[in-house]
Image (cartoon, rainbow, N blue to C red):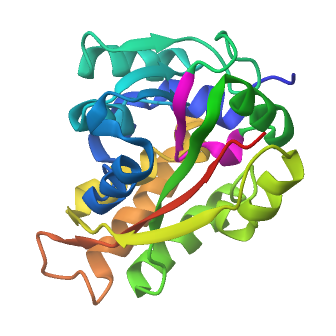
Amino acid sequence: MGELNPAAAVGFDREAASYASVRPSYAAAALDLLDDCIGLAGGAEVCDLAAGTGILTRQLLAAGAHVTAVEPVVGMRHEFESSTPGAVIVDARAESLPFGDATFDAVTVAQAFHWFEAGPALAEIRRVLLPGGVLALLWNVRDESVDWVARWTDIVHSMTGGRPYHDHRELDWAEVIAGAGGFGPVERASFPNPRAATHAAVVERTRSTSFVAALDDDRQREVLAAVEEMTATHPELVGRDTFPFPYDTVVYWCRRVD
């Protein structure tokens, strides 16, 4: 398998604390959906891939699941361990999992599958799932129909060259998963997940973005200054100490079939 994408390896390692401080948890309704199809409250065995700082892991644990987290970036694992004491976390990648066949009731991937090599990762996920086990992909998606959010995206992308990966919203996940074989139909649901924000939090959210975090210090300061200027002058935000940061939690899920 290839190496981790440099933006992920460098950016997430460098700004793991920033990521932990500003990234939102997932909508409660999304966890209810996972409970319904996985049985979290009954102590389901879940592998949380690319668990990062543990945002979804903690929600799965709170719902009653037994969770084994997987995270290959050192900085993210350290942040995970400090914020999720006692939880199990393993240094590994989705494309090469150190678990036996048919180990888990479910595999979850939050805010991360777009970093994977889809074919090898799906083969490994299917291998470690029990027959009938669930694969769930989750993303917190910014609502770019809100003008200041669209402006934020324009600034970040124009000043950095944009994402070093395919935007997950541009991919047909049902087609990607079907291409791997061994999974049933993919279902999709979306749940509103707004979070209270401040001007400083939007700047910090920018800093936590992998390809911003991976920039050299001078260029990163320029990007953050441009975002700070935008939030200070945008008519939707002027004079507001707090305001909603509009997200939706999008969930795709399917089952292993034989």
The image quadrant that residue 32 belongs to is bottom left
Q: Residue at x 59, y 65 (%)?
A: 187
Asked whether, in this view, residue 23 is left or right of residue 221, the answer is: left
- Can residue 45 be spotted in the picture? yes
Q: Position of residue 182 (x, y in %)?
A: 80, 43
Q: Residue at x 70, y 61 (%)?
A: 185
The image quadrant that residue 140 belongs to is bottom left
Q: Position of residue 104 (x, y in %)?
A: 54, 25
Relative to 133, does residue 174 appear above or below in the rendering?
A: below
Relative to 63, does residue 148 appear above or below in the rendering?
A: below
Q: Position of residue 46 (x, y in %)?
A: 46, 28
Q: Residue at x 35, y 63 (%)?
A: 228
Asked whether, in this view, residue 51 is left or right of residue 98, the answer is: left
Q: Residue at x 44, y 50 (%)?
A: 37
From the viewer's side, name the closer residue of 251 and 115: 251
Relative to 216, does residue 71 appear above or below in the rendering?
A: above
From the viewer's side, name the closer residue of 250 and 258: 258
- Residue 110 among magenta residues: yes
Number of numbered discs overlaid on the protein picture? 0
- Residue 223 among magenta residues: no
Picture quarter with the C terminus? top right
Picture quarter with the N terminus? top right
From the viewer's side, name the closer residue of 158 and 125: 125
- Can residue 18 be spotted in the picture? no
The magenta-colored residue range is: 104-115
